[in-house]
Amino acid sequence: MNIDFGTAFHKPNGNAVKVTINEFRDKLYLHIREYSMDGDTGQWYPTKSGFSIPADEVSSLIPLLEDASDAVAKRYIWNTQLELELENDYEY
């Protein structure tokens, strides 16, 4: 079984980080790996940069990734609220 979930993001060097699942010796693994494009064929191929975890451990990783995502989001929150002074031209 091989499933390519797609590209998570592209790196400045032109490589892509992809999420895939494959089977090796009858065991499923989730891979988060950097891919590089072959200039001659245009095909993407995996590099050594990245990691894999047993697929049955993915559910233990998700809450930690959600916590990390929340922490990163707090770092990038901008206060975009504007204060406007409005005159009240209406008489009640």
Image (cartoon, rainbow, N blue to C red):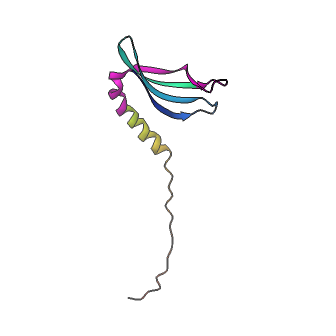
Residue 30 is covered by the magenta coloring: no
Vertical side of 31 occupied by 66: above or below: below
Which quadrant of the rendered structure holds the C terminus? bottom left
Q: Which residue appears farthest toward the right when viewing the image? A: 40
Query: Residue 65 appears at what percent x and percent y?
Result: 40, 33
Q: Which residue appears farthest toward the front when viewing the image? A: 41
Q: Start and end of the magenta stretch? A: 36-63
Q: Residue at x 53, y 35 (%)?
A: 9
Which residue is more in the foreground, 6 or 8?
6
Vertical side of 72 occupied by 3: above or below: above
For residue 26, side relative to residue 75 (left or right)? left
Which residue is more in the foreground, 84 or 4?
4
Residue 62 placement: quadrant:
top left
Q: Which residue appears farthest toward the bottom when viewing the image? A: 91
Q: Residue at x 63, y 33 (%)?
A: 12
Q: Number of callouts in the render?
A: 0
Which residue is more in the foreground, 10 or 83?
10
Query: Residue 53 appears at what percent x and percent y?
Result: 40, 20
Q: Which residue appears farthest toward the top when viewing the image? A: 25
Q: Residue at x 51, y 24 (%)?
A: 33
For residue 26, side relative to residue 85 (left or right)? left
Which quadrant of the rendered structure holds the N terminus? top left
Q: Residue at x 51, y 52 (%)?
A: 78
Query: Residue 7 appears at what percent x and percent y?
Result: 51, 33
Residue 40 is covered by the magenta coloring: yes
For residue 11, side relative to residue 33 (left or right)? right
